[in-house]
């Protein structure tokens, strides 16, 4: 709890609905734009990718790095955020 | 390694099934291989193969293994940039033979550097990962490395140069190919780690460069030590220069980063002479070594990539110019994106934000940098730089809005994220609105002043005519002279400034005798007099104008008021009509079942049952209209006279026999429809934090009609939380796109109960979500809520919004925890 950001807490607190990809923890404006360019325009699309990769941490992190150039911290934040969301709502 | 890379090339032609089976063969079970997961699995395959290779070849290549093992261990941490990795990898292979001639010390130094700095993966773009936590590690590494390098290499000067020359080319090649993979993270890394001034990065083009720059930084940083013939510091800079493309990238990259750091560092003063020196030697590559040394003296302490060194002779400069041009063209767009990155990061770190913007040109040395930079890198100077300069000039005065204004100038693609960012800022900054109104106020004032002056001018123009003077005879001589003069005046048609007026004003004057008045066409009134006249005239005109405007305004307001009143009354009437119909219908139904009842209802009785006693007088007019409406427009109700208990009453009779056709089964709107998910620890805070709640997605403002739908929302919330008598204020934000409702409770405990009741429920087909708000923000927004202490209750016991739920008792009250 102490090591998660405000964005993380907000995302995990409710169903993501139609939230933009920038609502994900670790994904800011620039990364979000890159993801959108690649076609991942909503958070649920990234969730889809996360699930297709079978929620595997390393694969998801690699994918995130390849797709939008996220650094390790950002990857970790995003992964943690999605994993917790899945634990709560999936 | 090359064998591995060869296999990797082949891997690109694998089909999905082959890829999948290859991975399984290596012991890893993959998920579906789709077009988005393919690259990830390819990488995984590569890595697994390398691991195999490495396990087999560990004994033979000590260095490689060290590096690859560190690669695999640090696969996710930032370290030496990809260029270093890429440069290192081929360099190791290709360059080793030629560099054999060069000093082994240099090679060893490089190798040592690579392993020390935990060389990145074999892939070029691992530079993408940079991290805060890695920075201190890197920083820690660098000074040690540099010092080692510097001391170690001082003995062999020529060797490192050759090596580095070669490496520079390699690095360039590597850099070229990896331009696509820019990484803002790298830039951030440098910025954070930057502690010393890099004055001649100030000279570097302000075009922001990609992370590639950043990638090269660590390598060149470490390379520096091995290069300098002048000692550790200057050596670092010299070394950096010999890798022209790298250093240029660094320059330009670090330029942005170093500047903020330079703000903090005490290196400013030594950097100034250096800058001027560099400014003087425009692109010629003739850096004063002294200048370089000056800057460098300060740098060692910082342990960060330092400033400059001196430049190599013209070849570097030439290369740099070439690179610069190339880069300039290719990086225009990335420059913008990078600037956004900087901005974005600045947004999160306002402290450094200030530095950035200030550094970029808003403050003193920044401006000087900008100046010195321009002549030197004229070719690099392009729109982004200028835009940034302007931006910075803007931002210097208004610091909190620097991200706002900084974001607005760049013209190209980052329009959408800018807007979002702007919106974010606008929402957060309450004073943003104030700023806008100040803006409009100033324009209004300006136009008012202009108008005033225009009016004054007009008044002056009019002043030239006016006023009359009478002639007075003084004595006989004068009279004769006057007569002659007047005759002459009549004879000549010139305009000498005197007008002759006869007894009738319109008449033309032909003889002296007819003249009764003289008028001066250029009256010479005193200034005060003129001013006064003008003043009064203006005042009168203005007052008239204002009066006219006020009258029109008043008329408009009145019309609007009347119209609204009319609408209100009509709506009330229709409500009443509907209520009456409802009552009559139900009475009719009751009559059918119960034959004892009379099939008609007296009108006054209906009125008294529908309208509360205290409202009867107010609603009289509405009632009358409703009755009239019913008698004319409603065919199912018949008005007749009946005698009831000895008195004559006008009664209504419901005459629609069948009931079925009137059952308009309307989809109930605005009702609660159940809960979507159980509230547990993970999707709701364990304890309620504040007494204020923000409820989202309760309505769609576009779909709502009428003025009073928000009351229905109020009712719905109160009914849902009917067991919780701690709600003191509800506010529906009618304009919010998300359908926000703000609720304040008596205490955090009450709001926690309300949270549990509301969060995750379905209302009117929409999933409602709740979050806590800070009390002071709530009070800021709704000052009327500060004094609310009486709990609100739903206005009717009918509980219409819960009607659906009553049929299916929800179990959510059993879940959750208090």
Image (cartoon, grey):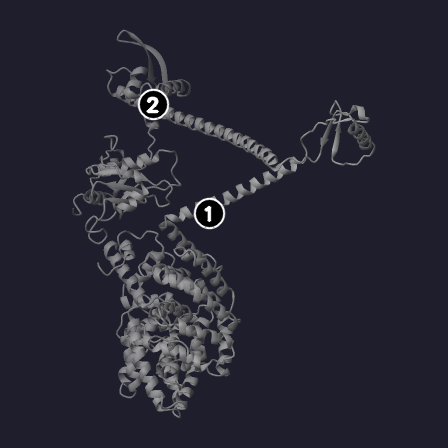
Residue B602 can be seen, yes or no: no
**Which residue is at a point 48% across and 72% down the rendered structure image?**
B327
Q: Position of residue B240 (x, y in %)?
A: 41, 80
Q: Please determine if labels 1 and 2 lie on a single subunit.
A: yes
- Tell me the crowding category of disc 1: few under 14, some 14 to 19, or many 20 or more residues within 10 angstroms, Cα based: few
Residue corresponding to mark 2: B581
Name the residue nearer the viewer: B505 or B210.
B505
Chain to which the residue tagged by mark 1 belongs: B
Rendered-image quadrant of the N terminus of chain B = bottom left
Task: Using the numbered discs, state the Cα–Cα distance from disc 1 to disc 2 in whole angstroms.
Answer: 56 Å
Q: How many marks?
A: 2
Residue B312 can be seen, yes or no: yes
Q: Quadrant of residue B692?
A: top left
1 or 2: tag closer to the N-terminus:
1
Residue farthest toward the top in the current orientation of the protein: B646
Residue farthest toward the bottom in the current orientation of the protein: B101
**Which residue is at a point 30% across and 85% down the rendered structure image?**
B63
Asked if disc 1 and disc 2 are in contact, CB closer than 8 Å, the reply is no
Residue corresponding to mark 1: B439
Chain to which the residue tagged by mark 2 belongs: B
Name the element at disc 1.
Answer: helix
Name the residue nearer the viewer: B678 or B493.
B493
- Tell me the crowding category of disc 2: few under 14, some 14 to 19, or many 20 or more residues within 10 angstroms, Cα based: some
Q: Position of residue B451 (x, y in %)?
A: 56, 40
- Picture layout, residue B334 above or below residue B586: below
Residue farthest toward the right in the current orientation of the protein: B491
Q: Position of residue B89 (x, y in %)?
A: 37, 82
Name the residue nearer the viewer: A81 or B199.
B199
Name the residue nearer the viewer: B33 or A57.
A57
Q: Is residue B269 left or right of residue B496?
A: left
Name the element at disc 2.
Answer: helix
Q: Position of residue B586 (x, y in %)?
A: 29, 23
């Amino acid at each position: 709890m102490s090591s998660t950001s405000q964005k993380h807490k907000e995302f995990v607190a409710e169903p993501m609905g139609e939230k933009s990809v920038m609502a994900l923890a670790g994904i800011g404006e620039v990364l979000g734009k890159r993801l959108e360019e690649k076609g991942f325009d909503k958070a649920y699309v990234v969730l889809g990718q996360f699930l297709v990769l079978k929620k595997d941490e390393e694969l998801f992190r690699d994918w995130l790095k390849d797709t939008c150039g996220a650094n390790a911290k950002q990857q970790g934040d995003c992964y943690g955020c999605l994993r917790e969301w899945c634990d709560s709502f999936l | 390694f090359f064998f591995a890379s060869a296999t990797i090339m082949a891997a690109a032609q694998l089909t999905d099934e082959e890829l999948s089976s290859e991975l399984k063969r290596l012991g890893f079970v993959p998920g579906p291989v789709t077009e988005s997961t393919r690259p990830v699995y390819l990488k995984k395959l590569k890595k697994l193969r390398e691991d195999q290779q490495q396990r087999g070849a560990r004994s033979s290549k000590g260095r490689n293994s060290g590096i690859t093992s560190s690669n695999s261990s640090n696969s996710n941490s930032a370290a030496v940039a990809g260029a270093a990795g890429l440069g290192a990898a081929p360099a190791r292979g290709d360059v080793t033979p030629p560099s054999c001639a060069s000093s082994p010390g240099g090679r060893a130094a490089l190798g040592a550097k690579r392993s020390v700095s935990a060389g990145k993966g074999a892939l070029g773009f691992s530079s993408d990962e940079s991290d805060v936590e890695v920075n201190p590690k890197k920083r820690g590494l660098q000074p040690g490395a540099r010092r080692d390098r510097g001391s170690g290499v001082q003995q062999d000067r020529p060797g490192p140069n050759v090596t580095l020359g070669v490496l520079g080319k390699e690095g360039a090649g590597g850099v070229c190919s990896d331009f696509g993979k820019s990484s803002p993270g790298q830039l951030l890394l440098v910025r954070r780690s930057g502690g010393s001034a890099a004055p001649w990065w100030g000279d570097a083009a302000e075009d922001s460069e990609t992370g590639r720059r950043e990638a090269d930084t660590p390598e060149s940083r470490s390379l520096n030590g091995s290069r300098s013939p002048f000692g550790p510091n200057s050596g670092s800079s010299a070394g950096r220069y010999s890798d022209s493309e790298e250093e240029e990238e660094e320059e330009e990259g670090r330029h942005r980063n170093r500047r903020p750091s330079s703000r903090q560092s005490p290196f400013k003063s030594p950097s100034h002479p250096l800058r001027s020196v560099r400014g003087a030697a425009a692109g010629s590559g003739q850096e004063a070594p002294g200048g370089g040394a000056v800057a460098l003296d300060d740098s060692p302490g910082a342990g960060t990539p330092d400033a400059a060194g001196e430049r190599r002779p013209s070849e570097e400069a030439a290369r740099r110019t070439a690179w610069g041009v190339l880069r300039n063209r290719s990086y225009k767009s990335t420059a913008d994106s990078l600037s956004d990155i900087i901005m974005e990061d600045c947004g999160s770190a306002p402290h450094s934000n200030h530095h950035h913007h200030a550094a970029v040109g808003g403050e003193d040395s920044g401006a000087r940098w900008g100046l010195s930079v321009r002549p030197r890198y004229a070719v690099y100077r392009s729109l982004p730089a200028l835009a940034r300069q302007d931006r910075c000039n803007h931002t210097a005065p208004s610091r909190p809005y620097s991200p706002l204004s900084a974001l607005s100038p760049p013209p190209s693609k980052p329009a959408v994220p800018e807007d979002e960012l702007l919106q974010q800022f606008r929402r957060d900054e309450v004073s943003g609105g104030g700023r806008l109104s100040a803006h409009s106020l100033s324009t209004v004032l300006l136009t008012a002043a202009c108008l005033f002056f225009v009016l004054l001018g007009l008044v002056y123009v009019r002043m030239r005519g006016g006023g009359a003077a009478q002639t007075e005879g003084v004595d006989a001589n004068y009279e004769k002279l006057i007569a002659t003069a007047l005759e002459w005046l009549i004879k000549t048609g010139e305009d000498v400034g005197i007008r002759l007026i006869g007894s009738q004003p319109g008449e033309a004057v032909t003889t002296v005798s007819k003249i009764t008045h003289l008028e001066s066409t250029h009256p010479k009134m005193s200034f005060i007099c003129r001013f006064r006249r003008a003043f009064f005239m203006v005042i009168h005109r203005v007052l008239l104008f204002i009066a006219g405007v006020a009258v029109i305004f008043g008329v408009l307001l009145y019309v609007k008021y009347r119209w609204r009143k009319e609408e209100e009354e009509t709506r009330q009437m229709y409500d009443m009509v509907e209520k009456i119909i409802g009552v009559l219908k139900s009475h009719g139904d009751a009559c059918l079942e119960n034959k004892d009842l009379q099939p008609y209802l007296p009108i006054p009785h209906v009125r008294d049952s529908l309208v509360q006693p205290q409202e009867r007088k107010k609603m009289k007019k509405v009632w009358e209209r409703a009755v009239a409406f019913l008698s004319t427009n409603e065919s199912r109700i018949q008005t007749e006279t009946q005698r009831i208990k000895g008195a004559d009453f006008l009664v209504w009779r419901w005459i629609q026999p069948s009931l079925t056709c009137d059952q308009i089964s309307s989809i109930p709107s605005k009702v609660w429809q159940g809960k979507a998910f159980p509230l547990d620890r993970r999707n709701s805070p364990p304890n309620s934090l504040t007494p204020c709640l923000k409820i989202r997605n309760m309505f769609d403002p576009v779909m709502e009609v009428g003025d009073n739908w928000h009351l229905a929302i109020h009712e719905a919330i109160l009914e849902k939380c009917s067991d919780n008598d701690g709600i003191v204020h509800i506010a529906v934000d009618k304009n919010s796109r998300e359908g926000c409702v703000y609720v304040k409770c008596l205490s955090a405990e009450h709001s926690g109960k309300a949270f549990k009741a509301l969060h995750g429920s379905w209302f009117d087909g929409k999933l409602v979500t709740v979050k806590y708000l800070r009390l002071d923000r709530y009070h800021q927004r709704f000052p009327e809520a500060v004094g609310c202490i009486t709990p609100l209750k739903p206005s009717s016991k009918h509980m219409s919004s819960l009607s659906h739920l009553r049929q299916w008792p929800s179990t959510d009250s059993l879940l959750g925890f208090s």
